[in-house]
Amino acid sequence: MTWGIVFRVRQTLRGSLWVLPLVGGILGVLLGTLDIQLEQNIHLPPYWQYSESTASTVLATIVGATAALTGFVVTVTVLVVQMATGTFSARYMRLWYRDRMLKAELAILVGTLTFSFALLRRVESNFVPNIGVTISGLLIATSLLVFMLFLDRYLHRLRPVAVAALVARAGRKAFRQAVQASAEPDHPDLHATPYHAPNPPTHVVRSRRAGSIQAIDGRGLVRFARQHNCLLVLPHVVGDFIPEGATLIEIHGGPNIADNQLRGMVALGVERTIEQDPAFAIRIMVDVAIRALSAAINDPTTAVQVIDHLGDTLRLIGTTDLDGLPEQAGQPQVGHVIIHTRSWADFLALGVTEIREYGATAIQVNRRLRAMLEELREEVVPQHQPAIDDELARLDASVARGFSDSPDLDRAGTADRQGIGGPDER
C-alpha cells in the first residue's frame, strides 16, 4: 500500500461519520453478550434486582429512546450543514464533520441501542440481566448529557467568529508543522519562485487521474532521490488541481520506470485539505468574509471579525523567513527534491485582495484592513515589508475610488482595529 493511499484512507476515516458509530454498535453487542455470561454466575441482593416486566419495559424504552435521539442528532447535523454552507463556506464543512464530539455522541447512542437490545432478547422468567439494565440506564443518561454538550457546542460554533477562529487555528497548526518539517535534513528543498532546471528532464511522471494535490510524502521522495542518484522536481504546489495526464514529477537523471512508486508519494483528492496546505485555511476565512459582504447578507461586522483572525494567521506567516528556510544555496544537485511553495506575497494577496474588492464601499472593512496591514508592516521580517506597502497602496486606490464622492473619505482612510468605533488615532 502506497503512502498516498494510506493518506487518503486516513482522511476518509477522519471525515467519516459512520466508522466510530459502527464500532460503538459492535462493542454494544459484545458487551451485552459478555454481561449476560457474567450475570448467569452472579447473585445480586434483592434491592438490585428487577422483575421480568420491569426489565423488559426499561430496556424497550431505552431502545426506542436511543433510536429517536439518534435521528434527532442526525436532523440537527443536517440543519447545521445547511446553515453553515449557506452562511459561511462549503469548504468549512470539511472541518465540521470531523469533530470528535459529534462522532462520540453517535457512537454512544448506537452502542447503547445495541447493548440494550442484546439484553432485551435474553430477558426471561428465570433470568433478568439486572446489572445490564442498570448499565443501560447509565448509558442513556450519559447519551443525554453528551447530547446537551453537543448541542451547546454547535450552537456556539455557528457564530461566524467561532468559525473563523476554528479555521485559523487549523491553518496556523499546519503552517507550524510545515516550518518544523522544512528544517529537517531529509526534507525537500522548497522554492517560493519557479525553479527551472538547466536541462530537460530525463523522464516525466504523469498523473493517472485528475484531482487536487492534498499532500506530498517529502521524506519518501528524498529517500528515492538519494537511492537513485537523481533530482526530482514537483512543478505544482500543494492545493493545485492536476488534470489527468498532466506532469506530476520531473525526474532529472536516475530511473525512468518508477512511475507507480513516485505517484504513490503524492496524494490526490477531490478537494484540498489543510494538513499540508495552510493557504486553504486562508481561503476558507476569505470565503466567509466575502460572503458576509455580499448584497444578500450585507454584514461587514462579520468580515471585520474574520479579518481579526486572518491577521493573526498572516502575522505568523509574515514573521517567518520563508525565503531563508527552504531554499538551498547554489544549484540543486542529484539526491535533492525541489517542491514549489507559496511566497509571503502569495499568502498576503490571498488574504487581502478579495476582501478589499468586495468591501470597497464598506467603511468598516477598509479601516480594519488598513489597521491589519499597518500592524503587519511593523512586525513581519524586513523582506516581507514591500509586499505590505504594495497592498497599502492598492487599499489607498480602492478607498479613493469607492469614497470619492463621500464625506467619509477621511474616515475610510483611517486605520481602526475595531473597523469603526475604536479610539481615534489620527
Image (tube, rainbow, N blue to C red):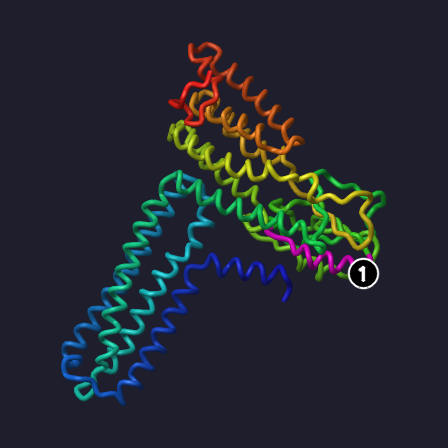
Q: Is the magenta region chiefly helix, strand or loop?
A: helix
Residue at x 47% of width, y 56% of height: 15
Q: Nearer the viewer, residue 327 or 225?
A: 327
- Residue 50, percent from left and from top: 16, 79
Q: Residue furthest right?
A: 199
Q: Quadrant of residue 126?
A: bottom left
At mark 1, the secondary structure is helix
* Rendered location of residue 114, percent (x, y): 31, 72
- Of 278 and 205, nearer the camera is 278
Instruction: Give the residue at mark 1.
Output: 228
Q: Which residues are magenta?
A: 214-229
**Where is 94 relative to 370, above or below?**
below
In this view of the protein, which residue sits in the foreground, 345 or 94? 345
Left or right: 156 with respect to 425? left
In the figure, 392 relative to 328: above or below? above
Please check the rendered image and state whether residue 225 is part of the magenta-colored stretch, yes or no: yes
Compared across the picture, whether 363 is left or right of 206 comes to: left
Q: Position of residue 88 (x, y in %)?
A: 42, 39
What residue is drawn where x is 46% and y is 13%? 409
Residue 86, above or below 419: below
Determine crowd level at label 1: few under 14, some 14-19, many 20+ residues with C-alpha closer than 10 A.
some
Percent x, y of residue 54:
14, 76
Q: Quadrant of the N terminus?
A: bottom right
